[in-house]
């Protein structure tokens, strides 16, 4: 007994070391066994920029490209999964691949036309369309039964009530989507709000309105653990997302607007109790600008939709290299990973964090979630 008492501290340290070694060595494992104990995930989406420009030595977005990676991790080989915008947003919460309608950003808010009943062997719904039927589940549909909360925050949604409501803003089924063009008072774009493209969400009006809200609600929600969702999705407006070099109201857009947006919102998130306790903030883009030989490249064995007539990137297999920056108490500042990842990898990582099954192409057996190259501090 005396010998065991003397050895107990040593055994405890060995247990901690072995636990961390196993965590660090694991590249991927099912249902979150290798992920740190993250319980608050924040995803912040920007628009249409290429990694070779965004993260260049003289980047036009120095806060994103230089300041934030010194506080977290840079994923240098992170890719979008298609062109144009909407297919990428849909993939991030469902694992569904782009189809001919989402590749056009769905100017008509139309229902999905099925080519066959049910999902295929890869969890994909074959056919074309915009609003997915209830057979297609989303990350929110997984989170709630597992006891986790979620919320989408959309900048400017409802600023012009004649266009869309301030919660769950979208056109009626079969009508033109009126948010494709920004106005001086309302720069919300439904195509950057993936939640409104699933019947499992929009058919329950009260649920959708409670979870898909204007970004103005975020600061209050961040004030306590109890009001901060386990999964938070943030979309800037069409000025602040970095897409257009000049805003519709004449103000600066592009990287200038995106960097200013991040300087405002990132400190609010990272100062919150939820982030400090067990948070992960992911900042990335939907797709590259599509230009040049690398504009539609892909990684990670990405597959097209079996029924699609076009490749996910239209001119290529994917959405191009865009890069990503991650901040977390579980990431050593200054981490750089060159492991290839894409939006399906991100979805799989979130599902692993919360111990959920994998949806769509996030379930591919050779797809890697973020591993020890990203989560570089012991849990």
Image (cartoon, helix red, strand yellow):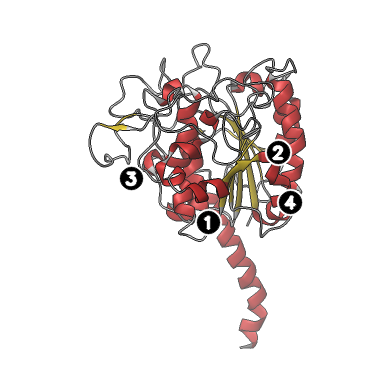
**Callout 2–callout 3 Cβ contact below 8 Å:** no
Q: Residue at x 48, y 22 (%)?
A: 84
Q: Residue at x 37, y 26 (%)?
A: 99
Is tag 2's residue or tag 3's residue first in the polypeptide sequence? 3
* Residue 40 percent across, percent down from the top left: 61, 52
Q: Kindly identify which residue carries mark 4.
A: 272
Query: Is residue 160 shown left or right of residue 109?
Result: right
* Label 2, label 3: how far apart the Cα atoms are: 42 Å
Is tag 4's residue or tag 1's residue first in the polypeptide sequence? 1
Depth check, mark 2 against mark 3: the one in front is 3
- Taking depth in this image into account, of 216 and 264 the one nearest to the observer is 216
On residue 22, the disc is 1
* Label 4, label 1: how far apart the Cα atoms are: 30 Å
Q: Kindly identify which residue carries mark 2.
A: 334
Query: Is residue 221 shown left or right of residue 209?
Result: right
For residue 27, above or below residue 322: below
* Residue 46 percent across, percent down from the top left: 61, 29
């Amino acid at each position: 007994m005396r010998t065991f008492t003397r050895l107990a501290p040593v055994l405890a340290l060995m247990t901690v070391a072995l636990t961390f070694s196993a965590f660090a060595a694991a590249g991927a494992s099912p249902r979150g066994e290798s992920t740190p104990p993250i319980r608050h995930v924040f995803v912040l989406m920007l628009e249409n920029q290429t990694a070779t420009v965004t993260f260049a030595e003289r980047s036009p977005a120095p806060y994103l490209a230089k300041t934030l990676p010194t506080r977290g991790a840079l994923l240098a080989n992170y890719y979008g999964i298609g062109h144009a915008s909407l297919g990428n947003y849909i993939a991030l919460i469902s694992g569904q691949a782009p189809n001919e309608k989402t590749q056009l950003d769905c100017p008509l808010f139309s229902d999905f036309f099925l080519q066959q009943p049910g999902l295929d062997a890869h969890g994909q719904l074959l056919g074309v369309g915009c609003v997915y039927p209830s057979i297609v589940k989303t990350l929110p549909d997984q989170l709630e039964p597992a006891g986790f909360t979620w919320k989408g925050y959309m900048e400017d949604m409802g600023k012009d009530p004649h266009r869309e409501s301030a919660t769950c803003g979208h056109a009626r089924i079969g009508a033109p989507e009126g948010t494709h063009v920004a106005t001086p008072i309302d720069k919300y774009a439904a195509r950057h709000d993936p939640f409104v493209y699933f019947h499992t969400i929009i058919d329950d009006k009260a649920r959708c309105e409670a979870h898909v809200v204007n970004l103005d609600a975020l600061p209050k929600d961040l004030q306590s653990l109890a009001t901060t969702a386990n999964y938070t999705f943030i979309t800037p407006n069409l000025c602040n997302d970095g897409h257009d070099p000049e805003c519709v109201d004449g103000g600066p857009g592009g990287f200038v607007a995106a960097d200013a947006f991040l300087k405002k919102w990132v400190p609010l998130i990272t100062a919150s109790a939820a982030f400090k306790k067990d948070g992960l903030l992911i900042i990335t883009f939907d797709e590259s600008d599509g230009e040049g030989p690398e504009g539609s490249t892909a990684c990670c064995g990405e597959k097209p939709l079996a029924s699609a007539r076009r490749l996910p990137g239209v001119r290529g297999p994917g959405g191009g290299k865009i890069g990503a920056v991650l901040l977390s108490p579980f990431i050593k500042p200054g981490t750089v990973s060159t492991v290839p990842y894409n939006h399906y990898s991100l979805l799989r990582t979130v599902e692993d964090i919360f111990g959920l099954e994998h949806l769509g192409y996030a379930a591919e057996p050779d797809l890697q979630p973020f591993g020890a190259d990203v989560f570089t501090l012991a849990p």
